[in-house]
Image: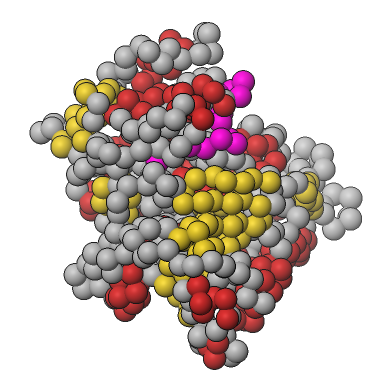
Amino acid sequence: MRALVAAACMAVATAVGAQAPANRADPAKVLRVAIPIAETGFDPQASQDFYSNTINSAIFEPLYEYDYLARPHKVIPRVAEALPEISADGTTWKIRIRKGVHFADDPVFKGVKRELTAHDFVYAMKRLIDPKMRSPNVFLLRGRLAGVDDAMAKAKPSGRLDYDAPIEGVRALDRYTLQLKLTEPDYAFLDTLTSTQTAPVAREVIEAYGDASGWAMGNPVGTGAFRLSEWRRGQRIVLEANANYREETFPALPVNADADARAAHAAMKGKRLPQVGRVEVSVLEESNPRLLAFNSRELDMVDVPRDLATRALDDANRLRQPYAGEGVTLQRAPEAGLAFFAYFNMNDPVVGGYTPDKVALRRAVLMGYDPAELIKVGLQGQGTVATQPIPPEVPGHVAGLRSSTPHDPALARALLDKFGYQDRDGDGFRERPDGRPLTLTMGSAPTGENRIRDELWQKNMRAIGVRIEFLQQKWPDLLKMARAGQLQMWMVGWTATSADSFMQLAYGPNGGETNMSFFRNAEYDDLFRRSRRAKDVAERDRLYARMTEIVAAYAPMGGGIYRIENTLARPWVHGYRKDSFRSQPWRFVDIDVARQKSGK
């Protein structure tokens, strides 16, 4: 899973009616959850943001996933029968698809149970490269599967891909066998097959509901544990258990399981998934309403808003009263993500470019900015300053590597002076070397967390004599502008489960997709491609370290934070095990209806 982020929070209605047997989803078990940023839509090939993918991951199923209980994380089959059968040269992957997996019912199937086949994966992957789709996820396959780049080039003049034309790199050998041919050995590719963006969709669904771009954002039909029941854009999303979901029970307890895994397994052992019959998701952008909803028992679970962390946690990060007295549980984990990193648009005439003066400006801005203060004030201590793009939770993080630009306002001022960014008119703010005004413009969403961040940026930039303004837009609109190269600066986040995904944030061919700075560097791009071919873990780490040095030198982005997530759960929630590699746990949890109804 990889996604852009801006902290999900979770939400539970009074349940009525007799309980159903424990071996099937019970409509009386209603889990209400919340997300803090509006979703963009529910088409797995078209969506990239964390909030939409939170919903998509409940509806759609990729070939593989990460084990819910195992730590360290390990990849296991989801709708595949087993891990790929890989040829001796590492380039041909054969994957068997489970039989008896069905899509949720939909009118397009005309009353017939629609079984998942290998052809559905072929179709989904072709959608990623269709120029009409303009998918922000095309980077997942481009240059990696044989024939994909040729197919894209052939489709470019007409703007349409021929879905019936074969592509060597992605073929259905028969109804239940998918074959992928890679252009070269790629030791990061298995993680790609865990992403929701590579999940299968039914061609007849897309052709029935797709818009002019081929996107079907409002009619998701997948094979997952839940299906979309109701959607009020930017306000409310309701999921119901998929009646066609196959027989699946709570996962086995791994060897050396920790206490949280053992507790979840003890509560759920032998139970069929999902147990919850309905999930209600509210979009609550402000922190106070989310925590208040949990306090008033309107929520089963909540990711504690980081700007309100001290209301739930004491100085030792222990649960405060009255939460502990009410039986509320706390689970903490580092986020598998890089948060609040600032990126500069390298094509922008003010902050972009590769000349020494432009590099000096970006480095000085990052030196002037103090992420440690944001952690202290905005996150109330729930994080650490990022030392490199790959967070500690993700394999590939290089222990001891410190490539982040240090907070040093004095050095920032000296650097700006040296390269001609000086206050010529005495108003306290610097001009550019040619005398024109110097003004930074950063995108900002209208939330309390962003207001704290913006105030800090203004304070920090004023200290080095740089004027900064903020472009206020809803987060989905900022995302569109960023992809189009229309923002000069923005602070955003990225969650992922592999080092490869984080290093794509500066990979040149991904400009406007994962690489929203549009940074290009030939050495970096070559090292990135080599890292995918490197079988030896130590060699990959060396390549990542050098790539990180290049980013630090040119400063297309920086100032990131590794956040700590804190999740509270009411005592009637069973089976929850915090998982930084998974956007939501709904398939694995159960609700004690009687306790939920009594609020105890």
In the picture provided, is 77 more to the left or to the right than 360? left
For residue 216, above or below residue 52? above
Residue drawn where x is 36% and y is 38% of the image: 102
Residue 124 lies, in percent from the top left, at 41, 29
Quarter of the image for residue 85 reads: top left
Give 313 or 263, whichever is nearer the viewer. Answer: 263
For residue 147, above or below residue 71? above
Q: Is residue 17 visible?
A: yes
Q: Residue 212: within the magenta? A: yes
Q: Main secondary structure of the magenta part?
A: loop
Colouring mode (rainbow / by chain / secondary structure / one colour): secondary structure
In the picture provided, is 166 more to the left or to the right than 54? left
Give 180 or 336, whichever is nearer the viewer. Answer: 180
Residue drawn where x is 30% and y is 43% of the image: 79
In the picture provided, is 183 more to the left or to the right than 290? left
Residue drawn where x is 20% and y is 39% of the image: 84
Residue 385 lies, in percent from the top left, at 52, 66
Q: Is residue 553 visible?
A: no
Residue 211 lies, in percent from the top left, at 61, 24
For residue 203, above or below residue 189? above
Quadrant including the C terminus: bottom right
> Magenta segment, which residues?
211-223
Q: How many marks?
A: 0
Residue 7 lies, in percent from the top left, at 57, 60
Residue drawn where x is 57% and y is 68% of the image: 15
Q: Residue 486: within the magenta? A: no
